[in-house]
Amino acid sequence: MTNVIPSPETVVVISAFALIYMLVLLKKTLQGKFDLYDFLMLSMVAIIPAGFTLFPRLAYLVSHLTGVAFPFVVMFGALFLVVFAFMHNMTARLHRLERQNCALIQEQSLLALELKAKESSEPGG
Amino acid sequence: MGMGLGLGMGLGMGLTDTCGSGVAAAQAAAPRILLVIPCFNEEASIGGVLSEIAATGCHYHTLVVDDGSSDATSEVASCRSPVARLAQNLGIGGAVQTGIKYAARQNFDFCVQIDGDGQHDPRAVETLLNAYRKQPANITIGSRFIEHEGFCSTRMRRAGIRLIVLALNSLFSGGRITDPTSGMRLLDRSAIAFFAKVYPTDFPEPISLAWAMRAGLTVSEVPVEMRARETGVSSIDGLKSASYMVRVLGYILLARLVRPR
């Protein structure tokens, strides 16, 4: 099969998307809405297609090595992998936060109860 | 413990007699028993439950855990008992664990869960204690299905409970169970220490048993009579029942494979 090189228009569009998207992510990271891990994982949506477009020979090499006919399929496979890794970590993080939230609410209620008991046991309390 | 408020705040009369009056020496040796009453919008029933506990004449300590109620549950309960108010609704698991953590910190010998909706008869606590005396187990469950008296839930739900029973009894050793969804249970010090660390938030009654038996705790049962709830409706109805079953069975299987942390 003949290797198809992306047209200059494709390169421009994908590069522009990657650049704008990365700038948006960077802004949100600097604002503290994302941490560095989120920035890295989310930026893969821009980096992977840009990598496949800007380095087509590398894309064909990767698809050849993985035994997949089209670099397009490999690209989506890589994106799915990133998304699953991100979701996996996010689920674990959410679960941990949920447990911490629950423990904090319990602690707060028990401390308030202890405080009330102390106040009522103090003379004049 | 500094919580000398409300119902029966004195010490009990020893494991053989926690009710009635007695001499100071017997009180000094008596076990300290905490009744944990989780509540969510139970202003209509909590007063009655606390009155019933007082009417038993037993020296129980009580803790009402208000699970983020939007009604006057806390106000009604605080006249008669200490109340732990959760800032957010955590669900029955989070509320019960709050009470268990309190029992662990205040060094109680036993902790008994009593529902705030009036389903549980506080007189049955003495039955649980008597059962513990005869056959000490880390968890003593008040079961509706040993003698099939009182309110026994709907037929569909009983069928589901049978499936859970089958799963628990075949996957774990440590006791034969007939009523894994009963909320009325007595915990001894080991169970209190265990559940203060880990307690399931979803479907806590059957899953907590699986976790406990996986950790080597023992479970026994004693027949008790339960009543239909005085107020409110069950959160597990219709299609939710099927989802409940699948998830509970999944959790039980998971507990068999992985020790809870």
Image: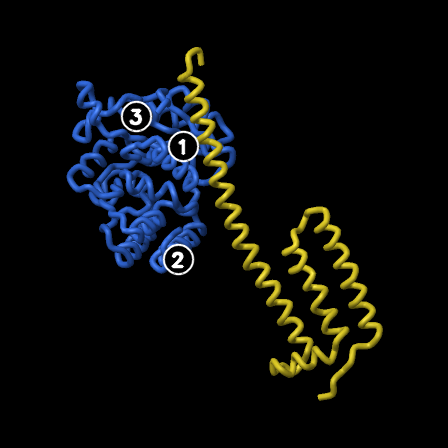
Q: Are marks 2 and 1 on the same chain?
A: yes
Q: Secondary structure at mark 3?
A: helix
Q: Are marks 2 and 3 on the same chain?
A: yes
Q: Residues within 10 Å of mark 3 (few under 14, many from 20)?
A: many
Mark-to-mark CA distance, 3 and 1: 18 Å
Residue B107 falls in image quadrant: top left
Q: Chain of mark 3?
A: B
Identified at 72% across, 69% down, the residue is A49
Residue labelled with disc 1: B231
Q: Is residue A41 left or right of residue B7?
A: right
Q: Secondary structure at mark 2?
A: helix
Residue labelled with disc 3: B53
**Residue B80 shows in this picture:** yes
Mark-to-mark CA distance, 2 and 1: 31 Å
Identified at 34% across, 48% down, the residue is B206
Chain letter, blue:
B
Residue type at tag 1? Thr
Is residue B233 depicted above or below B78 in this figure? below
Chain letter, yellow:
A
**Residue located farthest toward the bottom when viewing the structure as drawn:** A1
As drawn, the label of residue B250 is: 2
Q: Chain of mark 2?
A: B
Observer-nearest residue: B187 or B30?
B30
**Residue located farthest toward the top when viewing the structure as drawn:** A124
Observer-nearest residue: A46 or B25?
B25
**Residue B56 shows in this picture:** no
